[in-house]
Amino acid sequence: MPINLHCRQFIPYKLFSTLIVFLLCSFISVSYAQEKFVIRGTSLNYKGKIYLDWDHHVDTVLIKNNKFRFEGSTTGPVRARLSVDSHFPIESDGLYVEAGETAITVDTTIAVSLLNNREACMININFIKAGPINEVIGPLERKIKTLAPKYIHAPEAEQLQFAFGLIRDLFKEHPESFAPLFYLVSTGSEAAIPQLLLDSIYRQLPERYKTTIYGGAVKKRLEYYERTQTGQVIKNFKAVNAAGDSISTDGFKGKYLLVDLWASWCAPCREEIPLLKVLYEQYKGNQFAILGVSIDRDRQDWLTAVEKEQLPWVNAIDPRHFDAEIYRYFRANGVPFNLLLDPEGKVVGVNLHGEALRNKLAEVLKQ
């Protein structure tokens, strides 16, 4: 049952310019046994073809006598999108393909979109009969869209408080339903919400859900929080440099060490290099060092990237890719991933990028 957690996850912190999209878009896939599904619908004011975009393909049916029907097999709840023939961009209410029968009514309206302030064809979905996922998540997503105008220009802290409150209330209102956990992990929200809230959610999960791959994803995130806690002493990690010599994090004791996990194929990793060079030149010496650890599978790809980027710091590789020891130990969700360690090897900061990294180094190396 593979679960896709290896892409770099940009956790958005602008609620209704980005976070609303984040909460309304599933991007993690889990495979189970094939199960039959049926979606039967009534179109209130649209005639023609209607499309169901799900699981990387699109099904098409013709509406007849205001009725339409989609059917097939699914390996688990999958986020889908309805669309129709329109000259306007399409925005549809949330719909999940799940086992069993789902009955809906659909009406279409032309309205100004909250997301881009342009006219769009809005597909409004009302559930007549819903499975356990649509039954819980459908009302939640409608609530998010209804309340969006109140928060779209609110301060970031207020936006986050609202978003986290929605998730907290979802679990509180549906303690026995699997849907809140499914939603939390399928949107990647477990990687965004605070540790205390996530820990509270996990502790209150029914035991039967903790043993699922979704419960495992929450547990993994909690382990990440624990192992990246400020002041935590990390274990010694080793990788191999271009000459084949073993390089260890313990070899940098006595200095502040930035451990940078990256890969040649990772565009955001490469985009960070100019800033890292500036900071390295500013602080290198007895107080500060950088250890770049690539998770490239192909050694030559790594060597080519190091040469092209002219990386001046110590570089090593762990070709086990996402099974690299340091990557797995910290339960990283993607690259770039970094750790700032103090001279004793204790965690000072995690995943510091851009100005956050610049400011943290200025703080600890101000002397």
Image (cartoon, rainbow, N blue to C red):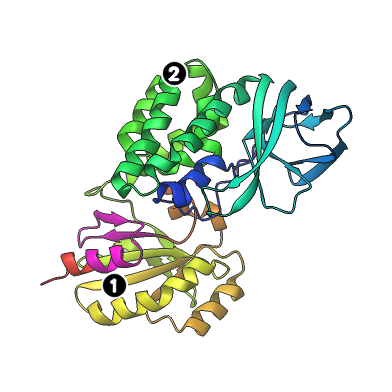
Residue 282: % across, % down: 24, 80
Where 89 sits versus 273, above or below? above
Residue at the disc numbered 1: 289
Residue 322 visible to the viewer:
yes
Tell me the kind of residue under disc 1. Answer: Ala
Q: Which mark is residue 173?
A: 2
Residue at x-position 42% and y-position 80%: 311
Q: Residue furthest left?
A: 367
Tell me the kind of residue under disc 2. Answer: Glu
Highlighted range, magenta: 338-360
Where 87 sits versus 84, above or below? below
Helix, strand or loop at mark 1: strand
Q: Nearer the viewer, residue 89 or 266?
A: 89
Residue at x-position 43% and y-position 43%: 191
Can residue 342 be found in the magenta stretch? yes
Q: Is residue 271 left or right of residue 157?
A: right
Residue 194: % across, % down: 33, 39
2 and 1 marks in contact (CB < 8 Å): no
Residue 211 visible to the viewer:
no
* Location of the N terminus (image quadrant): top right
Q: Nearer the viewer, residue 279 or 162?
A: 162
* Location of the C terminus (image quadrant): bottom left
| Circle nearer the viewer, 2 or 1 | 2
Q: Nearer the viewer, residue 286 or 80?
A: 80
Residue at x-position 59% and y-position 42%: 28
